[in-house]
Image (spheres, rainbow, N blue to C red):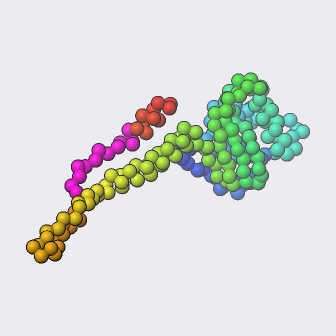
């Protein structure tokens, strides 16, 4: 199944939630069902190992199992998913990171689980570029409105005076003919600015 841009989708699996519930002990298992999960990660390798080798018997709760699981991940090198923040019962942050050693990791991406919904956090570039585009659109619309306003030239009142000194006619207020103004192309200015910032 193709999901397109991952930071533009929301994923959930109500059937999984109904069967297993959702808590800190199984939130990584729930996350592993989503399109955000990397099946070449250390998490998947470790899960496959557990299929043939049971975990230690002293792990009595799902939370103890999760802590044991993450401690084992810290001994490995490569891509992994860990729980970065917990606010039970309905909010977790999962972090995708590249581990180089036990104390050296590079954060690659964050994901939010709110209730049963999983979201990928947007990249900073996309967030700022979206805000800039919205602002530019508003400014461009305002400038276009100003460009399209008619300009009126008020000529001095001229009156024909008859021989008895009474004013008989008056020149009406007339709009002046103006040349069309050159429009500012904000799209190309924004494109140039964004290309230089990369």
- Residue 44 appears in the figure: no
Q: Which residues are magenta?
A: 175-188
Point 42% across, 34% down: residue: 192
Residue at (36% x, 55% y) in the render: 145
Residue 3 screen position, x and y as percent: 52, 45
Residue 181: where, in percent of width, then height? 28, 47
Determine which quarter of the picture holds residue 158: bottom left
Residue 172, visible in the rendered structure: yes
Q: Is residue 178 magenta?
A: yes
Q: Is residue 161 left or right of residue 83?
A: left
Snapshot quadrant of residue 71: top right
Provide the major secondary structure of the magenta segment: loop
- Measuring 35% from the left and 42% from the top, which residue is drawn there? 185
Depth order, front residue of 84/73: 84
- Residue 124 is left or right of residue 139, and the answer is right
Number of numbered discs overlaid on the protein picture = 0
In this view of the protein, which residue sits in the foreground, 85 or 189?
A: 189
Q: Does 146 appear above or below 58? A: below
Left or right, residue 1 beside residue 114? left
């Amino acid at each position: 199944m193709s999901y397109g841009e991952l930071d533009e989708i929301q994923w959930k699996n109500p059937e999984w939630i109904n069967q297993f519930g959702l808590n800190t002990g199984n939130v990584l298992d729930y996350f592993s069902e989503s399109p955000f999960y990397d099946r070449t990660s250390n998490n998947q390798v470790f899960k496959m190992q557990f299929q043939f080798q049971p975990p230690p018997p002293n792990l009595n709760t799902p939370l103890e199992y999760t802590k044991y699981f993450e401690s084992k991940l810290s001994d490995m090198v490569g891509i992994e998913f860990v729980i970065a923040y917990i606010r039970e019962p309905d909010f977790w942050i999962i972090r995708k990171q590249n581990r180089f050693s036990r104390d050296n990791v590079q954060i690659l991406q964050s994901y939010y689980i709110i209730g049963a919904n999983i979201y990928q956090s947007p990249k900073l570039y996309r967030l700022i570029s979206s805000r800039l585009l919205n602002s530019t659109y508003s400014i461009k619309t305002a400038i276009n409105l100003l460009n399209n306003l008619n300009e009126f030239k008020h000529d001095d009142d001229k009156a024909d005076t008859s021989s008895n000194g009474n004013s008989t006619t008056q020149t009406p207020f007339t709009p002046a003919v103006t040349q069309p103004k050159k429009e500012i192309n904000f799209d190309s200015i924004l494109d140039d600015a964004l290309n230089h910032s990369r």
